[in-house]
Image: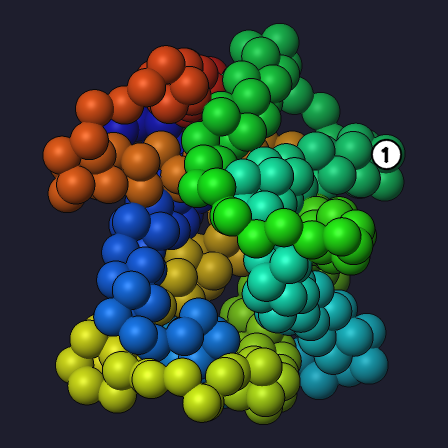
């Protein structure tokens, strides 16, 4: 508790990890009810609005408007939201059990860029935690096997592209925090998410049956706002903390997802999941040092 009080980045990072973990455990409910993930993206973009208004209120509605701020803030948003849209396409033709592990290791790129360009450093315990976190992310990534067979490697190219975009996004977010207000960054993230919403709608198969009731957009809104809040607190975590530590820590959100899923569905975890949970637990302790 003392560490959280002394290190505001840790409090924000833990909120992101918790909220994204809970979000991950429940996000499939609207999808299984018949509400497409592409429309779920659109709902997520809408949930960014109240969080953006909160951010604007904190800075008394004085958003950074310089060209550099607009470029950096929009880049963060486009890399994150654009990567999500590309992920939808990758999962249409590629096996999820390969796509997700590839993407889950995006912190590797963030760490590399932060070491090279921002000259960030970590102590020995934190480095052990970073390595364990990366291992845990791989082990805890979505194990669902997609039966779709593809004669093309397009999905692999798309998965690698998402890996690059999300790894770069986290680094740009940290870099932007050095030059503008965290709240402004999030507002631009919200705007770019909304701008890309028509693309998500265009990707939706409206010929299929879609759930428009309580289990559809309404439940999706409640679940997706957890994602939006987590995105906001991530911006704050990167304002105060090092990217090489914050990103691996928040990347452990699947720990919460797995635990909740095991409880909800009454599933006994296999050896891979147990190893992932153990590695993640140790990583969390070391990264919070």
The one nearer the camera, 10 or 261, is: 261
**239 left or right of 19 in image:** right
- Residue 85, placed above or below residue 61: above
Q: Residue at x 33, y 84 (%)?
A: 209
Neighbour tally class for label 1: few under 14, some 14-19, many 20 plus, Cα within 10 Å:
few
Circle count:
1
Q: Position of residue 26 (x, y in %)?
A: 26, 56
Q: Position of residue 8 (x, y in %)?
A: 42, 42
- Residue 88 quadrant: bottom right
Indicate the quadrant containing the C terminus: top left, top right, bottom left or bottom right.
Answer: top left
Q: Residue at x 59, y 46 (%)?
A: 95
Q: Is residue 212 visible?
A: yes
Indicate the quadrant containing the N terminus: top left, top right, bottom left or bottom right.
Answer: top left
- Residue 198 quadrant: bottom right
Q: Position of residue 60 (x, y in %)?
A: 46, 83
What residue would you read off at disc 1? 116
Q: Residue at x 60, y 18 (%)?
A: 131
- Residue 206, placed above or below residue 165: below
**37 left or right of 23 in image:** right
Mark 1, secondary structure of its residue:
helix
**104 left or right of 64 in image:** left
Q: Position of residue 90 (x, y in %)?
A: 65, 59
């Amino acid at each position: 508790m003392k560490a959280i009080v002394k290190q505001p980045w840790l409090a924000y990072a833990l909120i992101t990890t918790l909220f994204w973990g809970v979000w991950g455990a429940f996000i499939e409910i609207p999808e299984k009810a018949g509400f497409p993930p592409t429309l779920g993206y659109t709902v997520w973009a809408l949930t960014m609005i109240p969080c953006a208004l909160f951010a604007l209120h904190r800075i008394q509605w004085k958003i950074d408007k310089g060209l550099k701020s607009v470029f950096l803030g929009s880049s963060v948003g486009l890399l994150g939201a654009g990567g999500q849209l590309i992920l939808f396409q990758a999962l249409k033709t590629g096996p999820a059990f390969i796509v997700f592990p590839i993407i889950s290791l995006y912190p590797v790129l963030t760490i590399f860029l932060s070491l090279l360009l921002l000259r960030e450093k970590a102590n020995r315990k934190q480095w052990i935690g970073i390595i364990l976190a990366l291992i845990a992310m791989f082990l805890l990534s979505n194990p669902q096997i997609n039966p779709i067979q593809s004669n093309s490697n397009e999905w692999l190219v798309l998965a690698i592209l998402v890996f690059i975009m999300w790894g770069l996004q986290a680094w740009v977010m940290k870099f932007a925090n050095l030059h503008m207000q965290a709240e402004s960054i999030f507002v631009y993230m919200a705007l770019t998410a909304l701008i890309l919403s028509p693309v998500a709608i265009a990707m939706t198969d409206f010929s299929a049956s879609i759930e428009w009731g309580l289990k559809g957009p309404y439940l999706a809104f409640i679940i997706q706002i957890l994602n939006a809040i987590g995105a906001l607190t991530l911006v704050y975590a990167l304002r105060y903390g090092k990217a090489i530590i914050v990103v691996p820590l928040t990347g452990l959100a699947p720990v919460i997802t797995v635990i909740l899923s095991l409880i909800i569905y009454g599933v006994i975890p296999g050896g891979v999941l147990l190893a992932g949970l153990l590695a993640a637990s140790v990583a969390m302790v070391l990264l919070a040092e």
